[in-house]
Image (tube, helix red, strand yellow):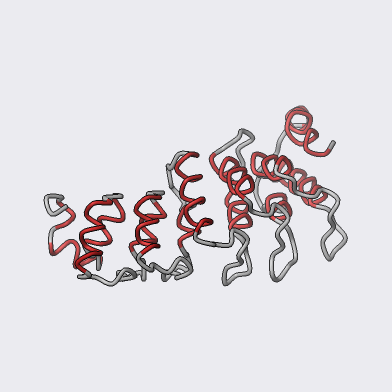
Amino acid sequence: LKSSPEMSESYSERLGMSPLHWAAFRGQVGVLQLLLKKKIYAVDTFNWSQTTPLHLASAQCHHTAASLLINHGADMCRENAFGHDALDMIFSEGSEASEDSVRHMLVTLTDANVNLDRLDQSGDSVLHTLAARGMGDVQNNNIATNIWTLVSIGANANVLQAKTQRTPLFVACDKTVKPTLGTVQALINSGAHLSRRDSAGDKATDLLLRRYTSWVADNHKSTEEAIAYYQRYVLPLLV
């Protein structure tokens, strides 16, 4: 561990990173075991952003390292300065973890009784956050895969936001940019209710059609382009 350039004393001090943080970040289980046994650092020691070793292990989907930290008392519900707990960190933006790695990490947390449908300080579940983050890709992108993985392990595709009482499908359909069709399709395939209406009386697909219409107008799409896109990508979601 000490042979790594970023483990230099000055670099680690600037980030507030302890050796426990680095070992968790890299999934170095042997090093973690040694450090935890010696009790040099508290299991929930944190850096400048209130990030703990469990946050880092979760972000990298090092499920064995995360399990070890949890077994030593790491707080799975603890939030960092950005309001993210261990569950949120699995789906950090820019994460390149494989589907299997995400699944193993989720199972590790659910085995420790983490609620996949818990709402954050903004009143959103993880599924709501992923639905809002969709990249507008019509293909089965990484976000769509993560949605399916979450639901297959036990997350509720129809969990409600605390404030709006909307499901993740409403969030995915109500994007202010090009509709996130890959995300929409993933939620529908995961059992999202198409018949549910919000407080305004709208169904999620009503919002999708409005966003599609706005996207066509704002981007000056030709009639031919608009019809072709609608028939290929939007219409299959509505039948």
Identify which residue, 99 or 173, lies in the foreground.
Answer: 99
Residue shown at the point (46%, 51%) measured from the top left? 93
Pick the front one: 181 or 144: 144
Residue 157 locus on image (x, y percent): 70, 52
> How far from the left and from the top, in percent, is residue 112?
49, 60
Question: Between residues 116 and 177, which one lies in front from this camera angle?
Answer: 116
Quarter where residue 164 is shown: bottom right
Q: Compare residues 45 and 127 and report the one nearer the observer.
A: 45
Q: Position of residue 131 (x, y in %)?
A: 63, 51
Q: Residue at x 63, y 60 (%)?
A: 117
Work out whether 18 lies above or below 223.
below
Instruction: Name above or below for residue 194 compared with residue 232.
Output: below
Task: Name which quarter of the figure residue 223 lies in.
Answer: top right
Residue 187: image location, x then y, percent: 69, 45
Say whether residue 112 is left or right of residue 220.
left
| Residue at screen point 45% across, 57% down | 89
**Which image quadrant is residue 125 in?**
bottom right
The residue at the point 44 percent across, 42 percent down is: 101
Total tally of numbered discs in the picture: 0
Q: Quadrant of the C terminus?
A: top right
